[in-house]
Image (tube, rainbow, N blue to C red):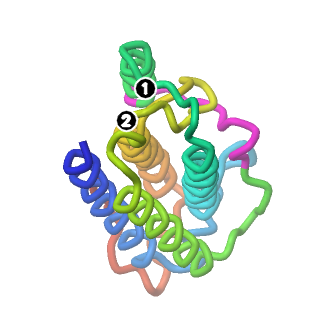
Amino acid sequence: MKQKINSTFQNIEKQREEFISFYDSLNDEQRSFNPDNESWNLLQVMRHIVTAERLSLAYIQRKISSSNNIPKAGLDSWFRTLILQIAFYLPLKYKAPKIAQVDEAYPDFESMKTEWDQVRSGFKELIDTTDSEILEKAIYRHPRAGMMNMKQAVEFLGVHISHHLKQVDRISSHPSFPVDAPSTASSSSSS
């Protein structure tokens, strides 16, 4: 189980590195560009992702610290995770759960990069130091899909970023996106 979790974690780390690399290639004006009053800018998208991961890690840490009566994640958990993954790949917009809403208009990019590094280090340490038996239990609660084991939680983190990469692409390909801004190194992202 741990080997599968670590493999999935390495995949989402590559995904995060590509995400950060794209953002690093943009300047402040581009990262702050807002396509309309109802949409997030690129900084707000990143703030949401980092906040969601930070809160997820905190929940899992709390759940593991009181691991007395945690049930093993079963078939129902697998099914809910599958439905969630399918929903995130559909070309639909979803309102972020209230707990992961973004209030800041222009979150600080460098601070978020540092925070994301810390959150991912926390996930890595948790995976490395927790018994496989506990990682197989229902230790993560998604706000809409319910309880999942650690592998499913890490898979969800990757699906979550992929979902928001579509949003990043929509913002960065908007007709008014400042493409001619001085420090642009690249205008494409990969997932």
Label 2: state its secondary structure.
loop
Q: Position of residue 165 (x, y in %)?
A: 42, 49
Marker disc for residue 136: 2
Choose top left, top right, bottom left or bottom right for residue 114: bottom right
Residue visible at 33% across and 73% down in the picture: 186
134 on left or right of 177: left
x and y, in percent, of residue 175 in the image: 50, 53
Q: Position of residue 151 (x, y in %)?
A: 34, 40
Mark-to-mark CA distance, 2 and 1:
6 Å
Q: Which amino acid is tagged 2?
A: Glu
Q: Which residue is mark 1?
A: 72
Secondary structure under the numbered disc 1 in the rendered image: loop
Q: Quick check: 14 above or below 175?
A: below
Identified at 62% across, 78% down, the residue is: 111
Q: Magenta includes 175?
A: no
Q: Is residue 140 left or right of 14 when viewed as pictured?
A: right
Q: Quadrant of residue 16?
A: bottom left
Residue furthest to the bottom: 182
The correct choice, above or below, for 185 with respect to 90 in the image is below
Q: Residue sitting at 77 percent across and 62 percent down?
A: 104
